[in-house]
Image (cartoon, helix red, strand yellow):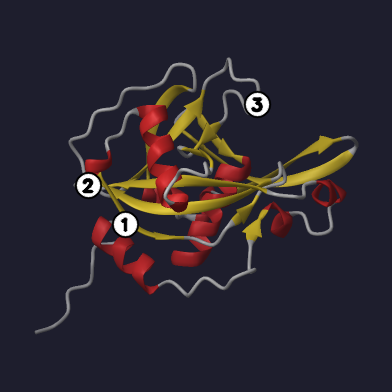
């Protein structure tokens, strides 16, 4: 019997790509340094703090989507920025996966019963001083969300097909202390996906879809 090719940007296709991705090589970090080689800002970020985020890919009938949050405007750091659910790894967590699941529930109330973890991507080193483990997950539809107003203003979904189209990966930059810092920018439907979050999306594209 001929093997059926999964529909592009379906959950079956995403699952197959994750399973077939190249092995993660220890020490082969992705991150802001790849977009800003030799930048002085990166010389002052060690020791790195360990964190994990969940990349929740939702199984929608008309094509997979990715669930994002918009951080609360009242937060002291990174307020109002689009992000993946996640945070600093706690010693009591069962690894990065445990952190990602815990933070996802705390931030948006997504129950673990709807989440299937299927893998990881290489660590992403952020210029802000974090080593982030991106945990890949498939989310079964039918869930409901309860946003933690102290942390999240909005949760929204973006088609995987949009995110994995390099035409939507704009390069942008800002100046900090008279030094230019480069990052990716992926605006969608009034939301701006940029910085570390866009860098992780770009890494996902390079690993699975390029």
**Position of 70 compared to 127: left or right?**
left
Q: Name the residue tied to disc 3.
A: 77
Say which label, 2 or 3, has the lower sequence index.
Answer: 2
The percent position of residue 192, horizontal first and vertical second, equals 55, 33
**Position of 34 compared to 143: left or right?**
right
Q: Which mark is residue 62?
A: 2
Name the residue rendered at 72%, 46% in the picture: 127
The percent position of residue 199, horizontal first and vertical second, equals 59, 50
**Badge 1: how crowded within 10 Å, few (<14), some, or many (20+)?**
many
Q: Name the residue tied to disc 1.
A: 9
Above or below for 15 versus 126:
below
The percent position of residue 113, horizontal first and vertical second, equals 22, 42
Which mark's residue is nearer the viewer, 1 or 3?
A: 3
Q: Are marks 2 and 3 in contact (CB under 8 Å)?
A: no
Real-space CA distance between mark 1 and mark 3, rounded to the nearest whole angstrom: 33 Å
**Position of 153 compared to 161: left or right?**
right
Above or below for 187 versus 190:
below
**Badge 2: how crowded within 10 Å, few (<14), some, or many (20+)?**
few
Q: Is residue 210 visible?
A: no
Q: Quadrant of the N terminus?
A: bottom left
Name the residue rendered at 46%, 55% in the picture: 165
Q: Disc count in the image?
A: 3
Q: Secondary structure at mark 1?
A: loop
Name the residue rendered at 90%, 37% in the picture: 178
**Position of 102 compared to 74: left or right?**
left
Say which label, 2 or 1, has the lower sequence index.
Answer: 1
Q: Are marks 2 and 1 in contact (CB under 8 Å)?
A: no
Above or below for 12 versus 132:
below
The percent position of residue 71, horizontal first and vertical second, equals 52, 26
Say which label, 1 or 3, has the lower sequence index.
Answer: 1
Name the residue rendered at 77%, 47% in the picture: 45
């Amino acid at each position: 019997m001929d093997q059926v090719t999964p529909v592009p940007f379906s959950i079956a296709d995403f699952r197959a790509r994750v399973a077939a991705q190249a092995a993660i090589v220890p020490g082969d970090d992705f991150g802001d340094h790849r977009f800003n080689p030799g930048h002085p800002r990166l010389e002052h970020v060690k020791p790195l703090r360990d964190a994990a985020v969940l990349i929740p890919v939702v199984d929608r009938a008309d094509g997979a989507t990715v669930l994002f949050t918009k951080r609360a405007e009242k937060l002291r750091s990174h307020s109002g920025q689009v992000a993946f659910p996640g945070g600093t790894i706690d010693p009591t967590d069962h690894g990065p996966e445990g952190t990602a699941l815990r933070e996802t529930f705390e931030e948006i109330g997504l129950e673990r019963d709807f989440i299937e973890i299927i893998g990881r991507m290489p660590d992403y080193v952020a210029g802000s001083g974090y080593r982030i483990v991106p945990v890949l997950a498939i989310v079964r539809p039918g869930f409901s969300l309860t946003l933690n107003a102290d942390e999240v203003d909005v949760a929204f979904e973006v088609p995987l097909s949009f995110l994995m189209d390099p035409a939507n990966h704009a390069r942008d930059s800002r100046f900090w202390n008279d030094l230019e810092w480069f990052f990716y920018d992926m605006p969608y439907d009034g939301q701006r996906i940029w910085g570390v979050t866009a860098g992780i999306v770009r890494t996902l594209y390079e690993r699975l879809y390029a």
